[in-house]
Image (spheres, rainbow, N blue to C red):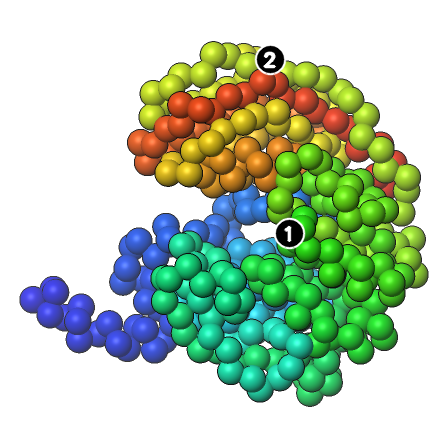
Amino acid sequence: MKAILKRIVRPFFRLAGLQARLDPDTRTIFPITYWYEPNLCEPSVQLALRDLISPGETVFDIGANCGSLSLLMSRLVGPKGVVCSFEASRRIVDKTQYNLMSNGCGNATVYHRAVFHTSRMTLPIYYGSHLNDSVLAANNHGHGFDNVETVALDDFTKTRKLTPSLMKLDIEGAEYDALQGGKDVIAREHPHLILEQQTDDSRCYEMLRSQGYIAIDLSTYQILKTYAGFPAGTTLTNIAYIHRDRIAATPFRGSMQLTKNIDLKIIAFNRDPCGTLNLATPIELPAGRYVFHFDHHAEGTKNEVMLGVEADGKPIARFRAYSKLLAENYQWMPLHLSRKTNINVFYRFLNRTSDSSFALRKIGIHRVEGFADTWNDFA
């Protein structure tokens, strides 16, 4: 009887955007924290959003995915602000809507559109192996596809009469096409931009640098004077682009340098699938902005590992990926401590997976000197 009732009411819940209530696995597949839980998603981007967004502003989350960063942006702009969340994937966008609604983000609106150089085109969007659907044919890995209508940022801002102060773009390599459709609003308003970038594609960098933007690698807080300035081996990173006319009002206005603080010792790694690697002893750090450097190596692609940092026993940041991706692209993790804190670092293989090639040589901590701290509500 319960199964029959479930089949009858399921379409109505889907129409109401409440499919996740009926499918317990939805929140695992499309993870997002509730409003009362700590948000541990993408620490480098989170810190940049906190540094650059003020109450009352209009911000765009382009490639909103399941809505985790849109939720944070909603809290940062406050009740008088506006969040526009763009998600192109049909199989993800209902989760975006549900997550924002269930967390009370009344200042956020979800748009099921692919942000592109031209409006009102119809493009195939190819399904990725996880939450990485893409409109680029190069990312077609045979998992199927759907169609989506496009919108250009200049058309959208003109029609909606909106002026974005910040735009975050994470759209699986299509960032340059999106910026091409927003040339007017970028030239006129100089919004802050946070872009996920592939280190072998310099088109966005060259375009924005020519328009007076300063590029800052959010993994290391180093200004990128050339596009070859990434740490060796990095293939993917997040970059903040701040226009020279606006940078004086941001915490990035100083001459930022990484000062070596300490190398951390670790205990022997337990290679049991459920094993966890921890610091031998938690270390006490004073308040400030830090960058952790993980000197690790791995070749595995059929596993799942979590790298995280705990402050006084509570997690404050983490990366989650297969071990090879983690080792190649997550060597650096920025953190902000608002008070003196005991820090622990852990590696944990999940779902009974492992990687015999995994090796952790050391963990280094660098303090970011010259960073102008403007908030102290996060630890």
Residue 146's tag is none
Q: Is 338 or 59 nearer to us in this picture?
A: 59
Which comes sooner in the sequence, label 1 or label 2? 1
Instruction: Specify the amino acid type for callout 2.
Output: Lys
Q: Secondary structure under badge 1?
A: strand
Q: Which mark is residue 265?
A: 2
The answer to whether residue 338 of the structure is visible from this angle is no
Q: Looking at the picture, how far across and down is residue 255, in whole percent?
A: 90, 39
Q: Which residue is mark 1?
A: 198
Could you say which is closer to the camera, residue 239 or residue 35?
239
Q: Amino acid at mark 1?
A: Gln
Q: Nearer the viewer, residue 145 or 48?
A: 145
Q: Is residue 217 left or right of residue 143?
A: right
| Residue 33 to residue 66: above or below | above
Is residue 42 at all visible to an observer of this figure?
yes
Q: Quadrant of residue 107?
A: bottom right
**At 26% from the left edge and 76% from the top edge, which residue is drawn?**
11
